[in-house]
Amino acid sequence: MNELGNTQAQEKENGDTAGYLALKEGAGVVDRPGKTILRLSGKDPAGMLDAILTNAVPKDANLGVYAALLNPKGRVQTDLRALKSGKEMLIDTELEGAGAAREILGRYAPFSRVRIEDLSENDEAWSILGLYGPRAMELLNSLQLAEHESEEIELGGASLLAAGVTAPVPGFDLLGPADAIRVARHYLVNAGATPVESDAYETARIEAGIPRFGADITPENFPGETGILESAVSFQKGCYPGQETVARMHYRGHPNRNLHRLVVDGPPPPPDTPIVQEGKQIGRITSVAPLPVNGSNLALGYLSRNTREDFPISVGETPISSIGLVGNDSR
């Protein structure tokens, strides 16, 4: 790499580090591209969702929920967040799960007299702007929202829906059309928020053990494997597609694999790198933190239930020194 390339790389690394510190110690503003936002309106969108989501939709007027949509065999087709906006519901999901969300919700909508609109495909496409960190509340006039609780707010004359966030970093997600998001971002940066690049946010996500659909969760996974069981599944609600498999695995069996947080003692491996023990593959890497944390390289990956705790594991020749099950309470 030439001198200019080295300088640009160093500037980027310094910027990413400053962004990571803003998330942990100040207030960071993060663009969240790649999210699909659907609006559900009509007779009873919350009731329709309650019939098909893995989690119960709260009765509270402004309280939403994190949940998943499963196929009849109990495998995760997408995870999503459902937020309340008056009598309407807003769904946001990763781009990789958007097609499944549209297809499954669209299958039930006509019977429930619910209309589905993809706000991400409008002329004025909606997106999400994150405001995270211990000073985030201060920049929104001491706004206090519980996780998945939502409230209409104004920033610099722009109207947005604010939603409470607890992980990977506490703060708020701001949902709205492109012009409103641009106004809000400008307002928050002028008010003292630090612009944060995606690498810093991704590092915080992996450090917190938050799986992402399309990387750590795919349509091959059952909820019990992924660490989202307690946050995304209710065992008290009524039936939903795939419920029998989820309940049977939870009460009678154990997943064949589980998602773990890993510390890699060497260069970070790319996703899909095999994890080995005694010469045999016992798992694979799914996500890798772009930035080191306290000098350590972090990753998420699946390990077989037969992994032995008394034998070392590695990726290639690189040892993994620390293993932690991704908690079902991590979201």
Image (cartoon, rainbow, N blue to C red):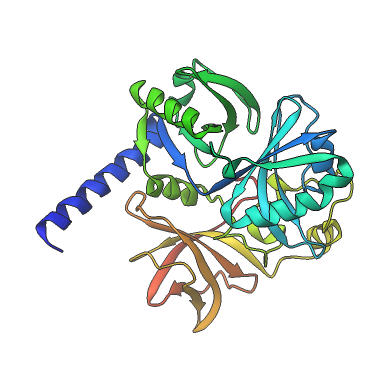
- The single residue placed furthest to the top in the displayed view is 141
- The single residue placed furthest to the front in the displayed view is 123
Q: Is residue 296 visible?
A: yes
Q: Which of the 4 quarters of the picture holds residue 151?
A: top right
Image quadrant in which the N terminus is located? bottom left
Percent coordinates x, y for residue 292 in the rendering: 35, 53
Q: Is residue 103 left or right of residue 319?
A: right
Q: Nearer the viewer, residue 108 or 245?
A: 108
- The single residue placed furthest to the bottom in the displayed view is 279
Image quadrant in which the C terminus is located? top right
Q: Is residue 327 left or right of residue 158?
A: right
Q: Is residue 56 left or right of residue 205?
A: right
Placement of 137 over or under 302, stated as above or below = above
Percent coordinates x, y for residue 62 in the rendering: 71, 25
Placement of 89 over or under 324, stated as above or below = above
Placement of 93 over or under 140, stated as above or below = below
Placement of 311 over or under 139, stated as above or below = below
Q: Nearer the viewer, residue 237 or 102?
A: 102
Q: Is residue 212 visible?
A: no
- The single residue placed furthest to the left in the displayed view is 3
Percent coordinates x, y for residue 42 in the rendering: 81, 34
Percent coordinates x, y for residue 110 in the rendering: 85, 46
Q: Residue at x 56, y 20 (%)?
A: 153
Q: Nearer the viewer, residue 47 or 193?
A: 47
Q: Residue at x 69, y 70 (%)?
A: 256
Q: Residue at x 63, y 53 (%)?
A: 98
Q: Residue at x 47, y 30 (%)?
A: 179
